[in-house]
Image (cartoon, rainbow, N blue to C red):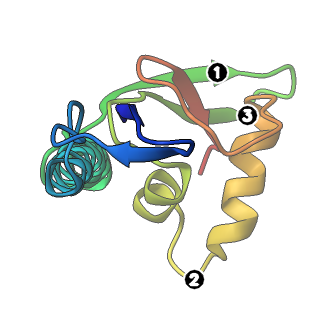
Amino acid sequence: MYMAYTNTTNSHSLHRSANTSKGMTLTSGYTKAIVRFVLLAIILGTVFSFGAIVQAYAGDPAATTTSTSQTKQVVISEVSQIVVTEKIVIQRGDTIWQIASLHKKNGENIRSYIDKIKTINHLTTSSLQEGQVLILPGS
């Protein structure tokens, strides 16, 4: 703000100049604040909607392939028992619950079957990786 002194008789007083608003006006300050707020809202909206899209496609079973590649193997133990084991290759989107529900015996508890899968494959968690080979308990 520009302040000017004027010389009058014996008194010095401050007078405002006619050009007091050399910088921002009050309305342009509000306008800039509103524009910044709108831009921030747009950026945040874009970031959050991108995250929601990724989350939706990551959890959508229709967007992922759930077929598993299967091979059967015959293992002959020392007692001459034939045990048929099944190996599957984990595909994108497969879960241990889904695999257990497809391959368990009728009437068998799915949680106990998952425990058997984890024991045979030396798993400490239920996390599976694409391309991982799982050995399923024999029938």
Amino acid type at circle 3 is Gln
> Which residue occupies the foreground of this view, 126 or 110?
126
Q: Nearer the viewer, mark 3 or mark 2?
A: 2
Mark 3 and mark 2 lie on one chain; the one further toward the N terminus is 3
Q: Which residue is mark 2?
A: 107
In space, the residues marked 3 and 2 are separated at their CA atoms by 24 Å
In space, the residues marked 3 and 1 are separated at their CA atoms by 8 Å
Above or below residue 71? Residue 10 is below
Circle 3 packing at 10 Å, graded few (<14), some (14-19), many (20+), is few
Taking the spot 24% from the left edge, 41% from the top edge, the residue there is 20
Q: Which residue is mark 3?
A: 81
Is disc 1 placed on a helix, strand or loop? strand
Q: Which residue is mark 1?
A: 75
Above or below residue 65? Residue 74 is above
Circle 2 packing at 10 Å, graded few (<14), some (14-19), many (20+), is few
Taking the spot 46% from the left edge, 45% from the top edge, the residue there is 14
Amino acid type at circle 1 is Val
Residue 138: x %, y % from top left: 62, 44
